Amino acid sequence: MSTAASPHTPLPTRIKLFNGSGSVAFGIKDNGFSVFLLTYYNQVLGMEAWLVSLALVIALVVDAFIDPLLGNLSDRTYTAWGRRLPWLYAAPIPLAFVWYFMWAPPVDGTPSFWTLLGLAISVRLLLSACEVPSTALVPELTKDYDERTTLFRYRFLFGWTGGLIMLFLAYQVFLREDLLSREGFEAYGLFGGVVIALFVLISAAGQHSHVAGFPKDRPPPFSLTTAFHEIREAFSEKAFLIFAAGALAAYISQGMTFALSNYLYYFVWQLNEAQLAIYPLILFFSVVAVFVGLNSLHQRYGKARTGGITTLVSMTFWLIPYGLKYLGFWPELGTTTAAATLFVFIFLSNAAGVAAVISATSMVAEIVEAFEERSGRRAEGSFYAGNWLVQKSATGVGIMLAGAMLSISAFPIGSAPGTVPMTVIFTLIALYCSAIFVLGVTSAFWLNRFPIDRAEHEARVVALNERTLMTDVDDTRSNP
């Protein structure tokens, strides 16, 4: 049996560190896909930009709909190492190789659409085979309301740090001499693959003695019919549907912002290279601030209320600079004052936004016991795979909205910062800010209505423990 901690026993710090370190792989992947992949395949390898984008969107959609099946398979894994560890030992080595080949395609000349699509799908699926089981370990490690938040604080800190360090190394080491160096990107891919594999394996090994052991119940033989029935049953849980509604709006907003980030920072705010170099540090310190302060917010307000409030706070601080710019109160663009003022608002907005995402992600852990109470079955993998399904689907919608906004505003192709007509800039800002407001209010509305609070969760844990104890006593009596 697993030696995971009892509901109110604080987890050892080393377990928090080892569990959190597994998310470094996700941070590296997210950074590479979001920042460099389109530029590399288009500008360096010579693929048409629309083909690169199409391949990445298709890979995202395929991954989103495979994730629930991976989560179900993880839930149904029955070994002496438990349900999650076999995945964490099996997936990272193939993932490292595929990650490297995505940056060093094994073809001469320009890769084909199908080569990129196959590599992108493989990376995403293997990354999910690491991330879904790793995240699903959180509700297995502890049933404590606050300890689960702490585990996710570590996971987000490691994920963001891993991605930002890779971003720094890309600009300052691998691509320092030439931003469009094929050899530089290949070195980036090799280093990233090694780091991904090492951190996932170290994370698994560090938690092994704490979580290894046969699951309490052996699942029936796998079949697609049973798997899809169990996935549908899990996703029909009321609390999950409420969470999904709030998360969907938040992730659409996030995907839209990521897709427009270069337009916003270069054309709207006209940041220079030196100022953009500071940007990752602003993000990093905002995540550190959340790591330090989020638990106290959850202890005072609970996860749902914290998630709803911080969503509105993040939206407000993000929109204020655009309002001030529209009203003519913003410092002159290109100055240190303008950049510093913008970074203050980015710090506050990102800190609140990360707090909201951690709160929402931690809420999913409480759905596990609600579902277990109703169905008698735990489905950590399915619920966290459902979280990824929502995130990835919403990100795709956000990217499409960003493209539509650029088309509606008639944003000119090949323009330099400072040369785009202000009517175009303000049309883009109006469309973007309107969407941010609607999505932010929608997300806050649903997250604040998440139905499981601390008291209900703790009462449910007690009831489930008593049920398990009675079952064990009955089994002992029937099998003396």
Image: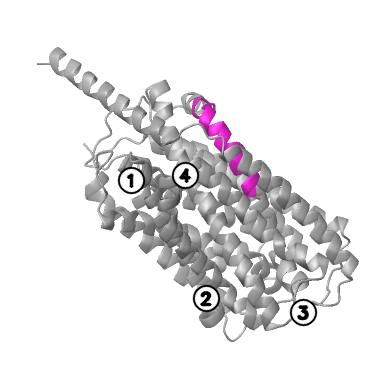
Kind of residue at disc 4:
Tyr
* Residue receiving disc 3: 332
Between 93 and 149, the one nearer to me in the picture:
149
**Mark 1 and mark 2 residues within 8 Å of each other at the beta carbon:** no
* Residue receiving disc 2: 168
Residue 215, position in %: x, y? 28, 34
**Mark 3 and mark 1 residues within 8 Å of each other at the beta carbon:** no
* Residue receiving disc 4: 301
Determine whether the residue tagged by mark 1 lies in a helix, strand or loop: helix
Nearer to us: label 1 or label 4: 4
Nearer to us: label 3 or label 4: 4
Q: Is residue 354 left or right of residue 251?
A: left
Q: Which mark is on residue 86? A: 1
Between 324 and 32, the one nearer to me in the picture:
324
Among the two numbered marks 1 and 2 on one chain, the one whose residue lies closer to the N terminus: 1
Residue 322 in magenta stretch:
no
Among the two numbered marks 3 and 4 on one chain, the one whose residue lies closer to the N terminus: 4
Name the magenta segment's main secondary structure.
Answer: helix
Quarter of the rendering occupied by the N terminus = top left
Nearer to us: label 4 or label 2: 4
Residue 46, position in %: x, y? 71, 70
Among the two numbered marks 4 and 2 on one chain, the one whose residue lies closer to the N terminus: 2
Among the two numbered marks 3 and 2 on one chain, the one whose residue lies closer to the N terminus: 2
Instruction: State the image quarter where residue 167 is shown.
Output: bottom right
Between 314 and 140, the one nearer to me in the picture:
314
Determine whether the residue tagged by mark 2 lies in a helix, strand or loop: helix
Magenta stretch, residue numbers: 232-251
Marks 3 and 4 sit apart, C-alpha to C-alpha, by 40 Å
What residue is drawn where x is 61% and y is 56%?
Answer: 314
